[in-house]
Amino acid sequence: MNIQNFKPAIVYAIYIAATPEKVWEALTTAEFSRRYFFGNAVEVDLRVGGAYIVRTPDGALHISGEVIECDPPNKLTITFNVNWPGLTEKLGPTLVTYEIEPAGDAVKLTLIQSHDRPLSDDILSGGRAGWPAILSSLKSVLETGTPLVIKMAPPERMLAALKEMGIKTP
């Protein structure tokens, strides 16, 4: 996979009153991620070529990928493929990069979701709704100890666009 072919489709930045090390821990450990990622657990082998997995609260595989770049606690780039039948085959892989930068007494966390082909706004609406909710909950946990309670569901327009492409969704 040539990551030079990937172009950013979603960029989201948030400032968090935490250290880069705490943000890194939140992004890369199952115990911490369950608290802000709506019960989902991130399991990552922190080396280039290592596995990146997200499991649902019941332990089912939800997202799988591979570590592309790992520079603790500054940058993590992974493939991020939702395990819906046919999704990756039809839409191609997703590349997610987390950039963590000190910003005074805070940290600037930038998420970049990239693709190797153009995707419609309907398809991208899921990430555009989901990432701000996930990272805002991460911010809340790090700053207050309490996650946000956000009602989350895939946008209807995204589900309709996937169905039109013959991709089955839960």
Image: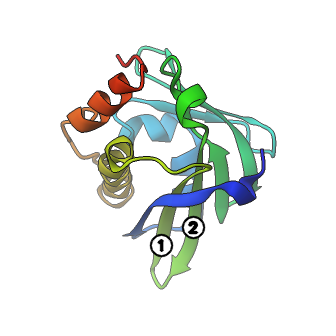
- Tell me which amino acid carries mark 2: Ile
Left-right relation of 103 to 14: right
User: Residue, x 34% and y 52% (percent of image)?
Assistant: 128
Left-right relation of 79 to 42: right
- Tell me which amino acid carries mark 1: Lys
Q: Which badge, 1 or 2, is on the more N-terminal residue?
A: 2
Q: Where is residue 1 in the image (x, y as percent from the top left)?
A: 77, 44
Q: Position of residue 58 (x, y in %)?
A: 42, 14
140 or 90, which lies in front? 90
User: Residue, x 20% and y 41% (percent of image)?
Assistant: 149
Q: Mark 2 points at which residue?
A: 100
- On screen, residue 48 above or below 72: above
- On screen, residue 159 above or below 120: above
- SS label for mark 1: strand
- SS label for mark 2: strand
Dot 2, how many residues are within 10 Å of its Cα: few (below 14), some (14-19), or many (20+)? Answer: many
Q: Mark 1 points at which residue?
A: 108
116 or 71, which lies in front? 116
Quarter of the figure with residue 43: top right
Tags 1 and 2 in contact by the CB under 8 Å rule? yes
Task: Look at the image and tell me whether residue 147 can be seen.
Answer: yes
- On screen, residue 27 above or below 12: above
| Outermost residue, bottom side | 104
Q: Position of residue 131 (x, y in %)?
A: 38, 50
Left-right relation of 128 to 98: left
Quarter of the figure with residue 74: bottom right
